[in-house]
Structures are given as C-alpha cells and as structure tokens.
Amino acid sequence: ISVLLAMPAHRDISPFTVQSLLQTQHALTARGIPFDMELHTAGSCITVARSRIASNFLQGDNNKLFFIDSDMVWKVDDVLRMIALSSVMDVVCACYAARSDPPKILMSLPEEFEANQYGCFPIDGAGLGFTIVSRPVIEQLAEKAPKLRFPGYEPMPHIFRFGEFGDEWMGEDIAFF
C-alpha cells in the first residue's frame, strides 16, 4: 500500500489539523508505509481542487488516494484503520459532523443495510472529508469523466463535480458516491 494524503484547501489550516498531519507523517514513516502529501488550493472551488488532486494522483505511483478536508482533526489510529480497511474495500469513508449550526452528519444510507465483518456498512453517499479510495476506482471514474480545461491547468478529467438527483442538487462528495 502506498498513499497520497490529499487536502483540498481554500482557507487557513488550523494548528490542530497541522498537528494531525505531522503525527500521521511520523506514524506512516515509522511503519514503512510509503506516502506523499498534496495540499491543493483552488480558490473556493472544491470541485476543481479535488479533480486536480485526482489527476495528479493518476500521474503518480500511489495506489490509495486519501482525501482529508483542511478543517479535519484526527488521531493517527483513525488513518491507520482506514488504510487497513482500504486493503479489503475499494472506498472507505468516515462520517463526521458538517460545519453547520446545529451540526449534522452528511450521510445517505440505503433503506436496509448490514455491517460487514469489519464493522463497515454500505452507504449511498457521504462527505469526502475523510475518505480513502483505491486507484482502480479513480481510474474508472477518470475514463468516464468529461475532460475540462480550468484556468491555469491542462485539460483533466473532472471527476468531482456537482450533480443532481431528480430536482435536487448534490455536492461533489455525494455525487461521487
């Protein structure tokens, strides 16, 4: 397993997030898990940042893409568990509270679901703020995605784009799922 830790950002990163990143870097290095880190800023357009990260990921050698939002704070064990789970599942995400008042969990569940032997269950959608994805998933999505040229970039697969379901708007994270 080799991982690209990717953080789309458009504002300041808290010291707590930086501390989580540094602890994760130390733990992965100590365990001999190859990784790269990418912080990508794209103004306020998260879809461009995520698609640019995916494009860079496809040009590299890592086999796991781990999105972590720039306002997340986590424990090293959370990352290690997600990496371990990604060795048996193509996409693994953790739910977390959205920045809203009152806080709410952004997750869409099927009507019926059952946890697997790892304690994970299928979802219809969730936030991408703490999600690890295997290379074949990104490759398949890149093949099907429209190739767009964003200002300052070469054309790239626009994988992470807003969507719609009937007459409802979907963020790039729910649309991804």
Image (tube, grey):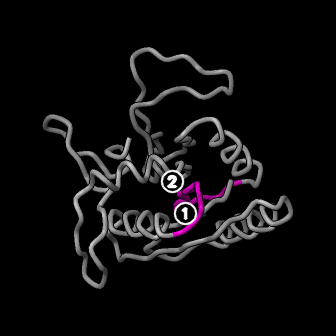
Residue range highlighted in magenta: 60-74
Q: Is mark 2 on a helix, strand or loop?
A: loop
- In the image, is residue 92 above or below residue 43? above
Q: Position of residue 158 (x, y in %)?
A: 29, 61
User: What's the distance in space between the residues labelled 2 and 1, CA to CA?
Assistant: 9 Å
Is 89 drawn above or below residue 175 in the view shown? above
Circle 2: residue type: Gly
Q: In which quarter of the image is residue 87?
A: top right
Q: Is the magenta region chiefly helix, strand or loop?
A: loop
Mark 2 vs mark 1: give the one in front.
2
Residue underneath mark 2: 129
The residue that appears at 40% across and 63% down in the rendered structure is 50
Looking at the rendered structure, the kind of residue marked 1 is Asp
- Kindly check if marks 2 and 1 are in contact, taking CB atoms under 8 A apart as contact: yes
Marking on residue 137: none
Mark 1 = which residue? 71
